[in-house]
Amino acid sequence: MTLLASGHLGTDFANGALPALLPFLVDRFGLTYTLAATLMLASTVSSSLVQPLFGLWSDRRGAIWLLPLGVGLAGVGIALAADAPSYWSCLVLVVVSGIGVAAYHPEGSKFAAYTSGRRRASGMSAFSIGGNIGFALGPIVATPLVLGFGLRGGLLLALPCLAIAGALVVATRFLRTFVPKRAEDGTDSTGHERRGALAVLLGVIAFRSLAWFGLVTFVPLWEVSLGHSKAHGNHLLSLILLAGGAGTIFAGPAADRIGRRPILLGSLVLTAPLIAVFVVVGGIPGAIALMLVGACVIGTFGVTMVMSQEYLPRHIGMASGLSVGLSIGLGGIAAVALGALADAVDLRAALWVCAAAPLAALALGVLLPPSRARRRLEPAVS
């Protein structure tokens, strides 16, 4: 699990560096809010919408080689994007980085499920913590590098990802030992698949992702519009992400004890008013509210991933790709509309939409049936 969480750290480190780079790229290329949001869209589409394809490949053929390849590609792509000579070359390199992220997540999530045993939500939370830490470290590392060395300093962002990729290559044989064997009689012991429930869950994740990607994209720009420094906005973003890691530590074990559905619904109830506090009050109370938003949203990423795997137990790679990829990607696409809204009206209006999105997610979430925890997960193809 430490190896898998480290790989998750590497991919999300690359992903988390992009929001921190946005204010600098806006200045360098003279971008509108819509063009800045388009960079986030490129990252979201490439890192999310294609994940089900990698998940399908993983379920049918096995693809452990995607683990080191995904981490390395994510790091190299974002490093080169930081020093890109034009907006369009930057956009292409952001897509390359996103494809690396997409390649890693379904396979990494599948192996995290294999190694978790019966405490699957707790195990997936451990896997998610790696991603949370990586996403938080992205802006923490990227900001001083760019402030100290200019955007060319962003080339150094590739180094930790390449180091983790090397470790995963060395550990490939060890990781293969966790793949469960299929039932000897050839029967399927994984239970009934509930695709309708999965569809509702994907809707919940999409609305939650609209709020999340809107905040990740516009909180640093909002703070700059209020007269704060770019570093201040990025530091606030890092606090949100670190708080999300703390929320993950709580949410996983709580979901194993109380149930996945109650933890998810409780987080959605809290998210909307907390975003409103940030927009209306601001200052220290607003920063605390944002940290709690991070705990609620990021903390339940692992919970919804486990729910998707339990709704689709015979295709856990595909389930992971859908829950982490497709639905989050759709939320990210919708966040681009927030950029257009910010250009047409203002950033405050976009942030109010972010506050409303969790309410739509909650309306869908009450329709979800409980997911069924099972003793083990079997691959469609080992």
Image (cartoon, grey):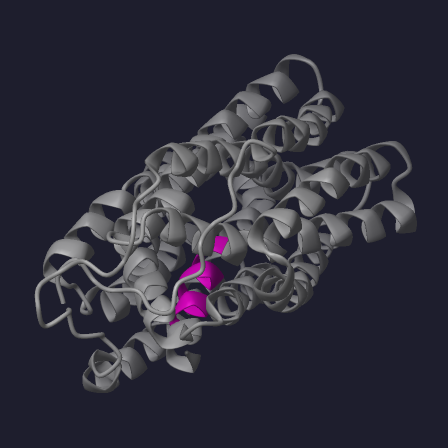
Residue 54 visible somewhere in the drawing: yes
- Say which of 203 and 189 sits in front: 189
Image position of 269 (left or right of 258):
right
Residue 358 lies, in percent from the top left, at 65, 33
Q: Residue at x 28, y 79 (%)?
A: 168
Find residue 105 and report its image quarter.
Answer: bottom left
- Say which of 111 and 355 sits in front: 111
Location of the N terminus by quadrant is bottom left
Give, as a single range, the part of the protein colored magenta: 7-16
Image position of 304 (left or right of 288):
left
Residue 64 lies, in percent from the top left, at 20, 69
Is residue 360 shown in magenta?
no
Where 158 sits versus 348, above or below? Answer: below
Q: What secondary structure prevails in the magenta region?
A: helix
Image position of 59 (left or right of 242):
left
Residue 51 lies, in percent from the top left, at 29, 46
Where 126 sits versus 143, above or below? Answer: below
Find residue 118 and report its image quarter.
Answer: bottom left
Is residue 11 shown in magenta?
yes
- Say which of 309 and 57 sits in front: 309
Tell which residue pokes out farthest to the top in this image.
344
Q: Residue at x 41, y 48 (%)?
A: 308
Q: Residue at x 12, y 55 (%)?
A: 60
Where 277 sits versus 65, above or below? Answer: above
Residue 86 visible somewhere in the drawing: no
Location of the C terminus by quadrant is bottom left
Residue 122 lies, in percent from the top left, at 53, 70
